[in-house]
Image (tube, helix red, strand yellow):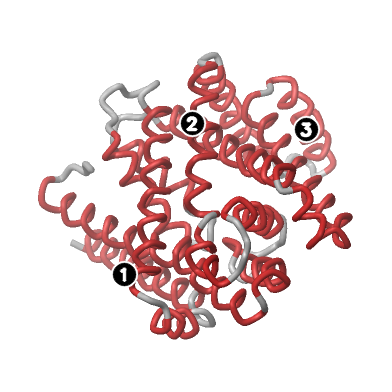
Amino acid sequence: MINKTKKQILKWIFVLAIIGIIIYTFRDSAGPILEQLKQTTPTVIAGICAMTVIYHVIEGLITTLLAKQYQPEFTVGMGITNAFFCSFYRVATLGSGAGIAAIVYLGDHGVQYSESFGMYMLQYAFHKISIAIFSMVLFVVNWSYMCEHFGEYMWLLAAGYAVTLLITVFLILFSCSAQFHRVLFVILDFVNRKCRGRLTSSIRMLREQCRMLEEASKHLLREKRLVAGTVLLNLLKFCFWYAMPYLMFGSMTDVTVSQIMAVTSLAVMLAAVLPAPAGIGSTEFVFTSLFSGIAGMGLAGSASLLYRFGTFVFPFLVGAVVVVARRIHKKQTGYVSA
């Protein structure tokens, strides 16, 4: 009885902590976003929501393709549910819990922890690679336009691309390179000796995680068509998020869909390298800064709020429904399914 009471208390503490984080996350943006939604036509809001749903459907398809390599019975419905499930925890934990949420969900549906951990890391690596590819391709396609509007900041853009490239290379090496792991542990073992063995348990855990990553990468990376298909699907899903600003102010300017996607992809890439939890604040800052010279400060600021709603708030709300539905289903049946 006492243990049961303790578990209930811990559950409520966890729930209250999540609520506190959510309130903190939306403390500055909730009011302006609601005000902007009131001023936006229902058609535009519906279009933003539809684009977000399509993005998550494609993300779910990517998860399904990868998960089927380990669990053939994993369905597209499970993959889509997982995408929204992770979106909820991405907000609720300021970005740090999305990976854990994915591993938990995959584990509930037959993918072993060792497999799901490696799979998620590779999926995230493919995601980051695709962001860099998308931004570079769109920048080249719209070279004249981008140089005209952002030529004076070319050194800053180059630095952003360089940092993104370094992060991407690190993710690839960390996800699949045994040689990289060996060099990493030579360095960590040296540091551990200097720290008199205080890092031994952490290094041991990291070794196990790296071993799982190597096994997962061997299994997935030998499927060349799967890797290529995953990257192509990532590029496709980005089209729906990066084209959102066109719905917001495209009809008020002479900018094309391709040009808007080029600027948005650049904003997302640059915001990702700024030190902010879950990109909160950094995305709006970079987005408004880049688009203000194209659509004006007023439109750019309004569009940044709507973009935050479409890519952050709306998927979080859908994810909250998914989380509650799974909780209810688990209590009723004792088993979680999509």
Label 1 sits on a secondary structure element that is: helix
| x 60%, y 62%: residue | 279
Q: Quadrant of residue 300?
A: bottom right
Q: Closer to the N terminus: mark 2 or mark 1?
A: 1
Q: Label 2 amino acid?
A: Met
Label 3 sits on a secondary structure element that is: helix
Residue corresponding to mark 1 = 12
Give x and y (percent) for residue 326.
Answer: 23, 52
- Side of 121 where 288 appears, left or right: right
Q: Nearer the viewer, mark 3 or mark 1?
A: 1
For residue 324, the mark is none
Give x and y (percent) for residue 184.
Answer: 76, 31
Label 1 near label 3: C-beta < 8 Å?
no
Label 2 sits on a secondary structure element that is: helix
Residue corresponding to mark 3 = 189
Q: Closer to the N terminus: mark 3 or mark 2?
A: 2
Residue corresponding to mark 2 = 119
Q: Quadrant of the N terminus?
A: bottom left
**Taking 301 as reference, is 109 above or below it?**
above
Q: Nearer the viewer, mark 3 or mark 2?
A: 2
